[in-house]
Image: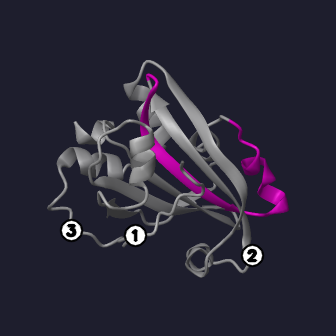
C-alpha cells in the first residue's frame, strides 16, 4: 500500500551535464512550456487522476526553494494519463495564500492548464534528477504494474506575481521520453 505524500528526496541539479541524456530525454525534461499541453498533443485522450490532496507542512528545504516563511501548504499528487496509460507522476506544493486559493481546488483539472494561461507566470530554473530502482517512488511504479527502471524527474519553482509554488514531475516507465 502506497502512503502519500511520496518522498521525492533526491539530488536535484540545475547545472547538469546533458551528455548522458538522449535528445528526446532532453526535449521532455527541459520543456519550458506546459508539459500538460505537450502530453495532450501526443495522445488521443488525456486525463488526470488525483492520488492525494492534503494539507502538508513544508520542509525547511522547500521553504528555502519557495522563499517563504509559511510552513503550511497543500500537497497535490496526480498521475497524468495519455490514452489511459500513466505517463507522469506529478506533485505540487502550494503554500496557503488567500489570493491564490483557486489553485487549491483543481479537482481533476491539470494544474498546467490553469497556470500556463496566466501571462504573469514565471518559471525558475528546471532542476532534474534520477530516481534509481531502490528509491521509494518505485513502490508506486510497482503498484501501477509498470517495470522498475531508473526514472527521470524535473522540478521547478513557479511564480504568479508574489505567489511561489513548487511542481515536480517524474516520467514513468513507458512515457514518451523513453521511446
Residue 60 horizontal side relative to residue 136, left or right: right
Q: Residues under labels 3 and 1: Cα distance?
A: 17 Å
**Residue at the spot of label 1:** 10
The quarter of the image holding the C terminus is top left
**Occupied quadrant, residue 44:** top left
User: Of label 3 and label 2, which has the lower sequence position?
Assistant: 3
Residue at 57% in and 34% down: 48
The quarter of the displayed image where residue 24 is located: top left
Q: Which region is colored magenta?
A: 83-107
Q: Residue furthest right?
A: 98
Looking at the rendered structure, the secondary structure element under dot 2 is loop
Q: Which secondary structure lies at badge 1? A: loop
The answer to which image quadrant residue 164 occupies is: bottom right
Residue located beneath label 2 in the image: 70
Q: Is 138 above or below relative to 67?
A: above
Determine whether, in the image, residue 32 is placed left or right of residue 159. Answer: left
Instruction: Please tell me which residue lies in front, 134 or 82.
Output: 134
Question: Separation of disc 3 and disc 2 at Cα?
Answer: 34 Å
Whether residue 32 is visible, yes or no, is no
User: Circle 1: is it few (<14), some (14-19), or many (20+) Cα within 10 Å?
Assistant: few
Mark 3 Cα within 10 Å, few/some/many (few <14, many 20+)?
few
Q: Nearer the viewer, mark 3 or mark 2?
A: 2
- Say the numbered circle drawn on residue 17: 3
Question: What is the secondary structure assignment of the residue under circle 3?
Answer: loop
Amino acid at each position: 500500500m502506497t502512503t502519500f505524500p511520496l518522498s521525492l528526496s533526491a539530488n536535484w541539479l540545475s547545472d547538469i551535464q546533458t551528455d548522458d541524456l538522449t535528445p528526446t530525454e532532453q526535449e521532455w525534461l527541459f520543456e519550458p512550456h506546459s508539459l500538460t499541453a505537450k502530453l495532450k498533443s501526443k495522445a488521443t485522450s488525456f486525463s488526470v487522476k488525483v492520488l492525494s490532496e492534503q494539507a502538508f507542512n513544508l520542509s525547511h528545504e522547500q521553504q528555502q526553494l519557495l522563499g517563504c516563511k509559511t510552513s503550511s501548504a497543500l500537497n497535490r499528487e496526480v498521475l497524468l494519463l495519455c490514452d489511459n496509460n500513466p505517463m507522469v507522476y506529478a506533485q505540487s506544493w502550494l503554500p496557503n495564500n488567500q489570493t491564490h486559493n483557486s489553485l487549491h481546488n483543481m479537482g481533476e483539472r491539470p494544474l498546467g492548464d490553469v497556470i500556463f494561461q496566466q501571462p504573469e507566470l514565471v518559471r525558475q530554473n528546471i532542476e532534474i534528477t534520477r530516481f534509481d530502482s531502490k528509491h521509494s517512488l518505485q513502490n508506486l511504479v510497482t503498484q501501477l504494474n509498470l517495470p522498475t527502471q531508473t526514472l527521470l524527474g524535473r522540478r521547478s519553482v513557479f511564480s504568479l506575481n508574489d505567489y511561489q509554488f513548487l511542481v515536480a514531475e517524474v516520467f514513468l516507465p513507458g512515457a514518451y521520453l523513453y521511446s
